[in-house]
Image (cartoon, rainbow, N blue to C red):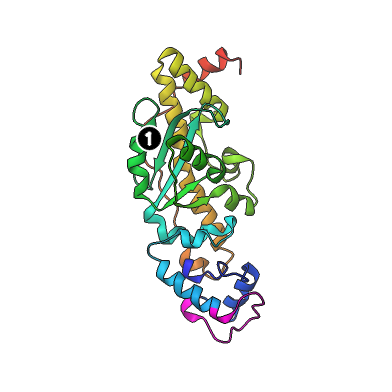
Amino acid sequence: MLQNTFCHIPGIGPATEKKLWEAGVTSWDQWQEPAPVRLPNSSRNEIISLLENSDEALDTDPSFFTERLASHEVWRIFPQYRHQTAYIDIETTGLAEDADLTTIALYDGAEVKYYVNGRNLDDFLNDIWKYKVLVSYNGKSFDIPFLERYFKITLDHAQIDLRYVLARLGFKGGLKGCEKMLGIDRGGLEGVDGYFAVLLWREYESYNDESALETLLAYNIEDTVNLEQLMIEAYNRNISQTPFAKELKLPHALAPPLPFQADLTCVERIKRRYTL
């Protein structure tokens, strides 16, 4: 899809891009001079130069495109860089800047990795640089800035924040709300949310309760693994609105085996302790 994209060019939005496709300009190498449609805000030289730069960036630089695409249009880069993509989600002790990081989950479509405060958080710094694209839900506003503050680093990866991509498709209400609307079943973790994740960490720290930590990791990892399903669903719904739906639609991914399962006894105990 990326090579069929023109709306990363200044002056070309989705409506003009659609007109280009209808006029037979369906990929970069089919660009015509003069352009078959009116392009009021872009000069000929700017467009040709940007298309040349796009071709050069195609194999190695996803940020070239995400920096030029609207937040709800970055789904277009996904197939091109899928092999360099990680899905990411974090858990913390709260939303304030002085909150502590508790766990991180990372999934690259094949392997689940997880990091726990007090055990192996620094391993995250070795692993994150293996990827060029990060897929999150609200990560641009929360997860990524939080990680950058916590580790005192800059994560210069290209980002696909599904909050914006899904909202454009009509799916809102947070990650769990979007999952429900798209038929993703949480099973034993139904009803567990970000606040409950804070309580799970508190239970682990206060009582050295490994079942609470494992339940927290199960929750964090499921958030992360589900991002792949949401990413593919969002991509396919968007691609269905283009002339390329038949050839570019992606198959659904198989969920990986999960290293942890929620301890429902632990969940009920915490609910009673905090009268939830």
235 versus 186 height, above or below = below
**Residues in magenta?**
27-45
Q: Count how many numbered circles sit on residues in the image.
A: 1
As for residue 35 lying within the magenta part, the answer is yes
- Type of the residue with mark 1: Tyr
In this picture, is 97 found above or below 46? Answer: above
Judge whether 136 appears above or below 59 on screen: above
**Which quadrant of the figure contains the C terminus?**
top right
Q: Residue at x 34, y 49 (%)?
A: 130
Q: Residue at x 37, y 42 (%)?
A: 256
Furthest-front residue in view?
Answer: 152
Q: Would residue 160 appear left or right of 254 to someone viewing this image?
A: right
**SS for dot 1:** strand
- Where is residue 92? Give x, y as percent: 50, 30
Q: Residue reaching furthest bottom?
A: 34
* Residue under pointer 1: 114
Image coords of residue 58 (percent x, y): 41, 66
Q: Residue 65, position in %: x, y?
A: 49, 62
Tell which of 51 and 87 is nearer to you: 51
Is 249 in the magenta?
Answer: no
* Horizontal arrangement in the rendering, residue 126 relative to residue 41 (left or right): left
Q: Assess disc 1: are there few (<14), some (14-19) or many (≥20) residues with their C-alpha within 10 Å of its C-alpha.
A: many
Work out whether residue 223 can be spotted. no
Which secondary structure class fits the magenta region best?
loop
Quadrant in the rendering for residue 181: top right
Classify 123 as above or below 66: above
**Image coordinates for residue 211, horizontal then vertical, percent:** 41, 20
